[in-house]
Image (cartoon, helix red, strand yellow):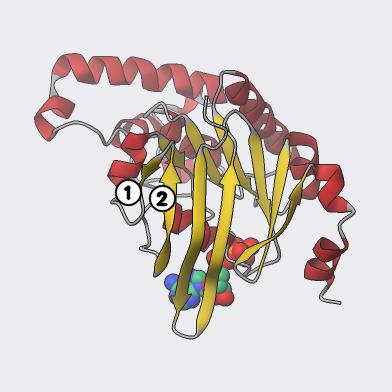
């Protein structure tokens, strides 16, 4: 088994004069719950966007399971086995919960997607996943009528439709009430127990410290420290980045 699942080398992305991701070399091991933390504006979301193909990096490389995926289109990266959620949860507000689940299956040709047998399989899987995240009773509701936390659960269930081996979550606990934060944490743990690797950007330190095996700390577009939750908590560089001293 390879010791690295996702690796970036000197990844760089600027917006005008802002060096959002600035030569970031990071490697994540398979099977872990990795956290990616750092102050606001330190480049975490831009890093996710570069890795998942939403943004083309200016330079540097992204390798997933030994394959170069730098600058590839999002659907190709999804097909390679990486799923993701968004910091500002993305669901289709006027579609039902079940319809949202079905549009998240992006692979396959249009004809294949519309084939009845395929659709039946997808519907069964969608229902199973909605039950797993605890919102199956809402399948006919429009997504806009769900609470924000429920929409996050829907987004997570949608991510699982493609059966990703690696799941990148951008602030899963952001704007979510404590009971649902616990549920999301429990889901991450159980999905990890099935062998899925996680990379989680999160500002909720209780969640980061209790959930993750390994923490990478970003500041100004690149990693400045990494280690176990206990190690990074005591690292002076991390305190400095957060407190700006
Ligand atoms: N599309 C964009 N156009 C211009 N500047 C951008 C764009 N996206 C991000 N930036 C800038 O890049 C820097 C990094 O932003 P990014 O959103 O990646 O940080 P972050 O670590 O995810 O922050 P937060 O914790 O607040 O979500 C910030 O200075 C931000 O303003
Ligand atoms: Mg962000």
Residue located at (64% from left, 71% from top) = 220
Quarter of image, ligand 2: bottom right
**Is label 2's Cβ within 8 Å of ligand 1?**
no
Compared with 49, 97 (above or below) is above
Question: Residue at 50% across / 57% down in the picture?
Answer: 9
Q: Does residue 116 sit above or below 97 in this rendering? A: above
Q: Position of residue 77 (x, y in %)?
A: 34, 43
Q: Position of residue 31 (x, y in %)?
A: 60, 28
Residue for point 67% across, 35% down: 180
On the picture, is 214 further left or further right than 77? right
How far apart in space, not on screen, are marks 1 and 2 (Cα)? 6 Å
Q: Which mark is residue 74?
A: 1
The image quadrant where one finds the C terminus is bottom right
Q: Are marks 1 and 2 in contact (CB under 8 Å)?
A: yes
Residue 52: mark in rendering = 2
Please, which residue is most extreme toward the bottom here? 17
Viewer-closest of 241 and 22: 22
Q: Is residue 151 visible?
A: no
Please report whichever mark, 1 or 2, sits nearer to the chain's N-terminal start.
2
Residue 234: percent from the left, percent from the top?
Answer: 90, 53
> What secondary structure is found at the residue carrying circle 1?
helix
Label 2 sits on a secondary structure element that is: loop
How far across and how far down the image is residue 87, in percent?
54, 54
């Amino acid at each position: 088994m390879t010791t690295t699942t996702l690796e970036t080398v000197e990844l760089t992305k600027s917006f005008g004069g802002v060096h959002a991701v600035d030569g970031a070399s990071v490697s994540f091991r398979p099977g872990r719950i990795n956290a990616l933390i750092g102050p606001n504006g330190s480049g975490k979301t831009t890093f996710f966007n570069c890795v998942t193909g939403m943004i083309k990096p200016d330079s540097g490389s992204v390798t997933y399971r030994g394959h170069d995926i730098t600058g590839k289109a999002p659907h190709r990266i999804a097909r390679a086995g990486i799923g993701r959620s968004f910091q500002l949860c993305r669901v289709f507000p006027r579609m039902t919960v079940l319809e949202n689940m079905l549009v998240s299956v992006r692979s396959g040709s249009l004809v294949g997607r519309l084939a009845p047998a395929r659709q039946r399989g997808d519907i069964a899987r969608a229902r199973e996943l909605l039950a797993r995240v605890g919102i199956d009773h809402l399948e006919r509701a429009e997504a806009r009528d769900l609470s924000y936390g429920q929409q996050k659960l829907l987004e997570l269930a949608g991510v699982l439709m493609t059966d990703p081996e690696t799941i990148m979550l951008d602030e899963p606990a952001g704007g979510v009430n404590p009971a649902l934060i616990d549920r999301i944490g429990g889901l991450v743990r159980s999905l990890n127990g099935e062998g899925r690797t996680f990379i989680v950007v999160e500002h909720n330190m209780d969640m980061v410290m209790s959930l993750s095996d390994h923490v990478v700390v970003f500041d100004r577009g690149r990693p400045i420290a990494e280690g176990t939750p206990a190690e990074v908590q005591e690292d002076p560089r991390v305190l400095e980045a957060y407190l700006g001293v």
